[in-house]
Amino acid sequence: MQVRRGTGLDDLVPRVLQRNSRALGRAISILEDGGTGQRELIRRVYGETGKARVIGITGPPGAGKSTLVDRLARHLRQREETVGILAVDPTSPFTGGALLGDRIRMSSLYTDPGVFIRSMATRGAMGGLARASRDAVDLLDAAGFDWVLVETVGVGQDEVDVVRTVDTVVVVTVPGLGDDIQAIKAGILEIADVFVVNKADRDGVEKTAKDLQMMLSIGEHGDWLPPILRTVAARDEGVDKLLSEIGRHRDYMQTSGEIDRRRRSHLRLRVETILKERVVAAADRVLGVDREVERGHERKVDPYRVADRLFAGVLEDAREEAREEIELEAEDGPAGPTEERMA
Amino acid sequence: MQVRRGTGLDDLVPRVLQRNSRALGRAISILEDGGTGQRELIRRVYGETGKARVIGITGPPGAGKSTLVDRLARHLRQREETVGILAVDPTSPFTGGALLGDRIRMSSLYTDPGVFIRSMATRGAMGGLARASRDAVDLLDAAGFDWVLVETVGVGQDEVDVVRTVDTVVVVTVPGLGDDIQAIKAGILEIADVFVVNKADRDGVEKTAKDLQMMLSIGEHGDWLPPILRTVAARDEGVDKLLSEIGRHRDYMQTSGEIDRRRRSHLRLRVETILKERVVAAADRVLGVDREVERGHERKVDPYRVADRLFAGVLEDAREEAREEIELEAEDGPAGPTEERMA
């Protein structure tokens, strides 16, 4: 088993690093599945990451994000830069997978070898999509794409998690959805680096831009004041300007050192999430998380004591291990472990 | 210090359990501050929790959630039931604290001793609001309120976390925000138990209800089919029906055993979050999380190895502790620790 998996990745990783589309597709499926294959894959490509420009494009459904992403990709291709696109689909049980269908209908980019497009949907456990799409960004980055565009609908926990991990966040809205600006405000507006009012040929564009302007003037922000741009993605208007503002944000991030600060903080969140998985797995093995949670459910103990007891159990298990080792050494003498190793 | 804090809670907790408004206000401030006071407070009241009916009311801004919550509270007061209300305010830097202001203008419930209203806003660390508002639900529950109504704007990670911890989720929308239904869909529609189309005297109510109906008919759901209700909260229309549907959901939850399943799963998430805080703190003490994250940032190791190394460090620290204890015993003989204890 071990050998076969190893051989699979030995074959797959070099093709991923050559940006082979089929290999990339297979690799992302491995990332979606999680488990040891996923971890081993990230381990092997991680050293090659950190070069791509990672842009998040988010906003409410109907804002025209897919069209905008397609236009951005075309402009970048004209500059002979390569583009990886991840369309992160929240896939409520109500809509499952509409995103990719729409995209296939509209995009001729699929046949361009300098472009890779993949739709990722929620499967299984909560938080799994955020983890998998973060891993997929690493993969496309390592594969050498100059740009990675991550498109997500700006609602829901997973999507906010996804968009928190990019270098530049573009928030797209459209005129006439007055309340939508409010609706996306809470989770997303704080982390917007660039605002786009798309479908700017529609009535109400002035009001939408003014509303955003007002919110920005009230809010606090650092040295970077998010610009508010107008685009008509369907007619390719304003896309050049959007790209140049994305570039300007990149320059700001690098000269100010903000890019390292942001990437460190993203990495820390990611590491903390993995740490949580490790400690929960260990607590499960030692005491059983559900069993202890049951005592909390019965109000015998409060949630903090449940957690403290689980953590103490994990540490005590490690201590017990050390004691047993010492005891074994004392009983068998120094030859003991060697014999055991030979058995 | 220890003594003073203890005395403070000794005085505070009994008054909380008597539903004294000032004590409740002070106690929630302690929960918002976090730290040892917060944990000790939850420890002391947790045994009294589990009796209140906890209802979440969520939806986009402008849907009329506050008015609906006020109406629900009035109806419950007419039945002589007590009501605790938590208005969880995302407080983007753009809007800070508007929610409570609106509520004060419209509500005469503030003078009713059978009602407690509190607005909670994001402060400090991400995830802090979800933790604090969950704690506050416990507090109001322990204080003996028959109902706890948690009102949140249905966007953003924190708010989704908050609404995931209630027994019954009411999702409120309004006619004419066609795209808003889509916008709230991703994170919230899956967990809705009851839909309300508020401002149902407006044009477009049929379409909104039909859209929801269609989404429900496509989606998967268990034995409970979320009803779609129409209300005009400002004129108190449909609020009775909403209350009876909330009651019907409660009955379903209890007869099906779903309420225990849901509460167990909420508690497990909560315990896992506390466990994460514990292991991160321990890893920080032993190796320094930022120092190890820096090695990941420099691409010397991948995020999984960073986490593995931190976790291994925590466990090794516990083992080392056990070894030192044994060594100390061996050196000093069994009398050693006793002497030490006497010193």
Image (cartoon, coloured by chain):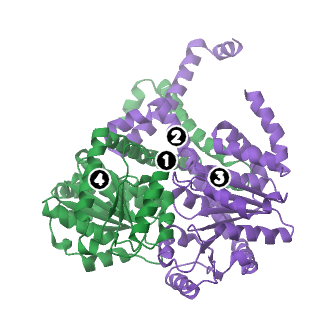
Chain colours: A green, B purple
Of circles 2 and 3, which is in front? 3
Type of amino acid under label 2: Val
Report the Cα–Cα distance between label 4 and label 2: 26 Å
The relative height of residue A337 versus residue A210 in the rendered view (above or below) is: above
| Mark before the other along the chain sequence, 2 or 3 | 3
Type of amino acid under label 3: Met
Q: Which residue does the numbered mark 2 point to in the structure image?
A: B279
**Which mark, residue B92?**
none
Dot 2: element? helix
Q: Chain of mark 4?
A: A
Residue B82 location, x and y as percent?
Answer: 82, 62
Q: Which residue does the numbered mark 3 point to in the structure image?
A: B120
Q: Residue at x 26, y 58 (%)?
A: A148
Report the Cα–Cα distance between label 2 and label 3: 28 Å
Q: Is residue A231 left or right of residue B186?
A: left
**Which mark, residue A276?**
1
Q: Which residue does the numbered mark 4 point to in the structure image?
A: A138
